Image: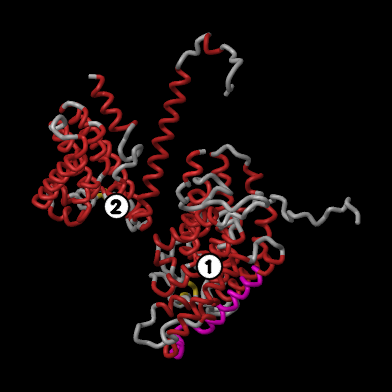
Amino acid sequence: MSLMHAEQTAIRHPGDSGRLMAWVAIATLPGIITLTWHFGWGVITNILLAILMGWSLEATVMRLRRRPIVATLRDNSALVTAILLGASLPPASPWWLLLVGMIAAIIVAKHLFGGLGHNPFNPAMVGYALLLISFPVPMTQWTAPLGLLSSQAPSLSDIVFHITGLSGTTLPDTWTGATALDAFKNKPETVMASEFWATSPLPEGARTAWYSVSLAWLAGGMLLLYQRIIGWQIPAAMLGSVLLAATVLYAVDPSHHGSPLFHLLGGATLFGAFFIATDPVSAATSRRGKLFYGAGIGLLIMLIRTSGGYPDAVAFAVLLMNFTVPFIDYYTQPRAQGHSRPNHGIKPPPSSNEDRR
Amino acid sequence: MSQFNDLARNGLWSNNPALVQLLGLCPLLAVSNSLVNALGLGLATLMVLVGANISVSLIRYHVPDSVRLPAFVMIIAAFVTCADLLMQAYTFELHRTLGIFIPLIVTNCAILGRADAFASKNPILPAATDGLMMGLGFASVLILLGGIRELFGSGTLFADMHQLLGPIAADWQMTVFPDYDFLFLVLPPGAFFATGLLIALKNWIDGRLAKRRQRQQPTSAQSRRVRVTGTIR
């Protein structure tokens, strides 16, 4: 055995966030391509505009903070934030919507807290949550899955016109449709789930489109797992708890709850599990903590989906669990070799022996 | 006179109840979504603060230390009830908009804090000045916040001012940005955000002022002496 070839060291990615983030960006490609295939060029324009804005905003802030601009842009974190936000927003969003979201993500959520590595909240999800509560109308108009090549689909020039914001805040009705989760959430209380699906409430092929997009995100997530960019703990715990909660609800009352498969594939669950919740900065850090963190996100998603006001809840669930990360990390800090168990929480009163000493 | 200058500077700037002590945040964040709400609550708080400070100062030799806080709270509650009834009588619509936040002035820590920390140890005139300045400091931040949130949240200024000032102000509403809506600033998270930015702005101004003062101070020969012990910064 030669000691000169120490290839397999413990650390596979020696502190290079640029490489790490580049892999995340590459892993989003299957999802982006599938989204574009089903929902049109608007997805691409979203992402490209967001990337441009992300880079310019990052450069501006770096100039104001008198830090090196190019070296910071090379860490690719602005790129990933822009891709994630661009992919989360409804396709062909107007430019001002993207700009407000990116300002909230890059400037407020990241740099006001001290830059990359100091942000307690996931930047892309801060941007998304701010947009969702501020502009509910343009944020809930998802384009219908007309397909990239169909003749009804909006042409590239239509999309560019819509991005300029001149056509008003609403897309033409022929382009838009509710998302599957949205339609199911807003079904009348008296309608059974089976009756609801029998009436074909969604545009043609919508459910297939959403399911295939979810599977594409899953493929990208598998790449990240294979490359060891992310650990298995957060996605597994999050998907497991979603599946468990959905199964319990479905078993108790199948007439008013979506099936577990629907909850797993019908919305942003898989996207969130592999690309949002695993953000290395804002997620829990210890292995055991990651399990708690992921499970919490999954449970919150199901809680908000079934009894909250929003049809999908990945952004809010992730942000809420980001709050708990310091708490989780404190209680799940792994024990170093040779150290005794840390005494967390309420300490027992010191015994009289110790007092005398 | 310098004591009153100090009181004014303390209340309005260097020890501002909203931006530095961060007291009374609950009403500050909850009702600063429009200028008229902010002005109404700011005036009510100002009145209560001055009244409470004067009364506490008057009885400062007659209240035993052990029961001073309950006594102060009773005094504050009495003034809040007066403010509540006055607003109900003269600005009924605004009273309904502000709702629970007028009775909640009782729990505004800024008021109890001034009563205990200042008014109970000082004569009437300084106590009244302190109440006035602290109240003005609180009200000005409240009004600034209300203006910012109304302007950038719904694009108007001075909307519904008639609720507070009567029919004169009926047509004061200015629409700065027509067809504009940014719900985030109207909703509570926007209040936290705007308050954070105001605090940052104040700290930034303070930092600039301190730097300028340092530059203007002539460096004497003694201060250039090389230190040979201790930490060199």
Q: Nearer the viewer, residue A118 or A127?
A: A118
Q: Look at the image and tell me in which quarter the C terminus of chain B lies.
A: top right
Q: Position of residue A173 (x, y in %)?
A: 43, 76
Q: Secondary structure at mark 2?
A: helix
Q: Position of residue A166 (x, y in %)?
A: 44, 62
Q: How is the image coloured?
A: secondary structure
| Residue at the (50%, 13%) spot, across then down | B219
Taking the view exactly as shown, the residue that stands out farthest to the left is B89
What amino acid is found at the position of numbered circle 2 in the picture?
Ala
- Give above or below for A210 relative to B161: below
Instruction: Point out the stretch of residues depicted in magenta.
Output: A197-221
Parent chain of label 1: A
Q: Is residue A198 magenta?
A: yes
What amino acid is found at the position of numbered circle 1 in the picture?
Ala
- Whether residue A95 is visible here, answered yes or no, is no
Identify the main secondary structure in magenta: helix
- Give above or below for A106 relative to A355: below
Q: Secondary structure at mark 1?
A: helix
Q: Nearer the viewer, residue B13 or A341?
A: A341
Parent chain of label 2: B
**Which residue has dot 1 on it?**
A295
Q: Position of residue B217 (x, y in %)?
A: 45, 16
Q: Is residue A324 left or right of residue B168?
A: right
Same chain check for tags 2 and 1: no
**Which residue has dot 2 on it?**
B30
| Residue at the (26%, 28%) spot, across then down | B8
